[in-house]
Amino acid sequence: MTDEEYELILKSGRIAAKAREAGAKAVKEGAKVLDVCEAAEREIISSGAKPSFPCNLSINYEAAHYSPVIGDQKVIPERAVVKVDIGAHIDGYVTDTAVTVSLDDRFSRLLEATRDSLMAAISNFKSGRELGEIGRVIERTLKLAGFKPIRNLGGHLIRRYELHAGAFVPNVFERGLGIVRTGETYAIEPFGTDGEGMVNEGKEVTIFSLKGVRNKILTEEEKTLLQIIEERFKTLPFTERWLSDSMEVQTLRATMKSLWRKGVLMGYPLLVEGRMGTVAQFEHTVVVRGDEVKVVTELD
Ligand code: MN
Ligand code: MN
């Protein structure tokens, strides 16, 4: 990683952190999910970066992958546990960060344990370490506090224009996942729950990304939308709100759906806790530089 690249990641991370705080501040009982996400995304754009994926706002037993749609009327209910997951990129240098806000004191221990597991994972994260060992630290921290990690979610290697670039940082011990290397950027993201400790796919799909376009027969409308998607997002995730200027909303939805069915787009379904347990999540992006591990999504 060059110094220029590192500078861009630092800047991107700082902007993502500011956006995370703007989102967290907007979380209130009765607030629209749409308004919270727009506040966070606006912070990124006004700072001169771009969102690296749509703001995810997930409530209670929802773990991830809900982003508000155009005209979304969904509001934050009373006593909710709300995850705000947001990311920025500058010229493809992606960062990713999340925080949980609880409107109910009963969940403070869950939040605290999940935050502690992130901090423990970060202090154990270093060049040469097995990725599976990071999962062991997260699992142990959460279990000692009486909670479970979500075993089928985890952190990930980040590359330029690639949010999920292969290597996986588990939230439980796992063998054979490879080792951390200098020059790499990772998102580390424990999820803690009082439920089953795994997520299932729900029905709703609000987040998409470009998958592959070879050998597909497309309509004129699909071609038009595809071109806009390629230009604006490359292979980074996006949502219908970010395409509202491209066509009328019903046509846009229908075209996105047909591109998804044809395998041109990938859809990310809502992820729901297996026993409808409450879920907390904390996430930071880190860069490994020799013996140093820099948390780039921290506010100083
Ligand atoms: Mn995230
Ligand atoms: Mn992530």
Image (tube, helix red, strand yellow):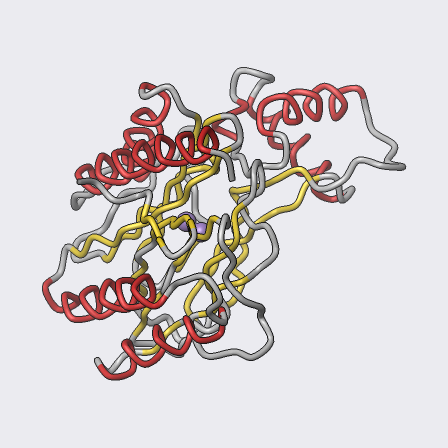
Give the image location of residue 89, x and y in percent.
45, 32
Q: Is residue 26 left or right of residue 268?
A: left
* Front one among 242 and 80: 242
Q: Position of residue 73 (x, y in %)?
A: 34, 36
Image mark count: 0
The one nearer the camera, 229 or 203, is: 229
What residue is shown at x 14% (from left), y 55% (from top)? 103
**In the displayed structure, would residue 40 be above or below residue 231?**
below
Report which quarter residue 37 is drawn in: top left
Q: Is residue 176 above or below residue 236?
A: below
> Within the image, what quadrant is residue 144 found in?
bottom left
Residue 157 location (% of width, % of height) = 52, 53
Q: Residue at x 57, y 60 (%)?
A: 167
* Left or right: residue 69 compared with residue 140: right
Outermost residue to the front: 290
**What is the quadrant of the C terminus in the image?**
top left
Q: Residue shown at 74%/39% (left/top)? A: 264
Q: Residue at x 74, y 21 (%)?
A: 221
In this view of the protein, which residue sits in the foreground, 11 or 88? 11
Q: Which percent across, then down, holds residue 211?
A: 71, 42
Q: Taking 171 as reference, is 247 left or right?
A: right
Vertical relation: 56 (above or below) 64? above
